Amino acid sequence: MYKEIVAICHTEEEYARRLADYINDHGLLPCPAASFSDKGKLTRYEKQHPVRHKVIPQDWAKHYTKEELKSGVSLFCDEEGMEEGMYVYRFRSADLVAEQICRMADFALPATKSRGKTKLIGVYSPVGRCLKTSFSLTLGQMLAQKYHVLYLNFENYSGFGKMMGMNKAVDMSDLLYYFLNLREEFHQKMDGMAFSMNGLEIIPPALSFLDLESVGEDEWEKFFDTLSEKGNYDYIVLDLSDYIKGLYRILLECTFVYTFTQEDGVAMAKVEQYEKILNSLNYGEILNRTRKISPPIFRKLPIRPEELIHSELADYTRRITEDDFHWNR
């Protein structure tokens, strides 16, 4: 007896094939996906094999009745905002497309990837000087009142030495060296270089961002996995920059993503360009877990980072992240 399939159909043969392969390779559906670029081949296949659900190009819709289009058939579209439940926006990530198909075919939703109990929080913006680091440190200190939290800064010029009054002999560059070359000493070295600020653990940022540029995408993923396993953290706050290889892959791993913008034309244009790039590279899923933040102008913020937790920014942070962390419960 043949096993039922989900048919991924599109006249762009390469797109349909790659999407079906990705879904199968990552087990995103409870049954196999098969690709079709020709309506006749799909029809011949259906005569002998069960098809649970079909996602087809809009110009194939004329071959189906209204009843068929309401159940068992979905349409690919190139524009967002089409009727929910019938259309699949094809420029989203394969993971999100699979999630939509699960709903349409009445499948149970696939389980999301887990890093144990540790959740990554990504803070990123294509806009400069937008309170991104101040927000990251504020949120980290607030969470540290209840959870075990680590803060990591990946900016090219963090200014931590001056800002924190530190003169640390070791920093993130050293930690990465041990991770890449002397893994057995990694945990011990990490314990020795972390310092606490209102309960928030912080690894001093690399003095030179060039040390971060040399780390590959896969190595970053393994690095965060190792931190999660060894550090027993509830949250790791990542203050990210464009200098990190695999930035989008890192953001895709984050449970929460905060993107800062400003109410001016240049800032909004930069964020719009960033969002278009995510969609074009099939990282649109990042946008679904992103909270866009346009902070007000604060009258006065403390110079010392450890005092941010008692500032206007802390009140603002608590208000805009209430749905994510339920501060008042």
Image (cartoon, helix red, strand yellow):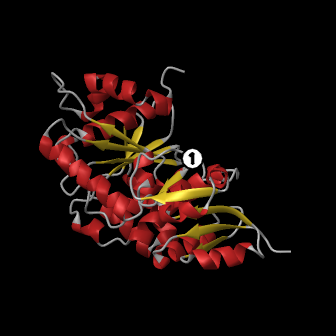
Q: Secondary structure at mark 1?
A: loop
Of residue 315 and residue 2, the one placed in the foreground of this image is: 2
Q: Residue at x 22, y 47 (%)?
A: 160
Is residue 52 among what the camera can see?
A: yes
Q: Is residue 72 above or below residue 13?
A: above
Amino acid at the residue labelled 1: Gly
Q: Residue at x 54, y 21 (%)?
A: 329
**Residue wearing tag 1:** 85
Residue 102, percent from left and from top: 64, 54
Residue 202, percent from left and from top: 36, 46
Q: Residue at x 49, y 44 (%)?
A: 83
Is residue 230 among what the camera can see?
A: no
Q: Is residue 325 above or below residue 42?
A: above
Q: Residue at x 41, y 63 (%)?
A: 282
Which quadrant of the rendered structure holds the N terminus?
Answer: bottom right
Residue 313, percent from left and from top: 28, 27
Horizontal relation, residue 132 to residue 190: left or right: left
Residue 82, percent from left and from top: 45, 47
Horizontal relation, residue 287 to residue 104: left or right: left
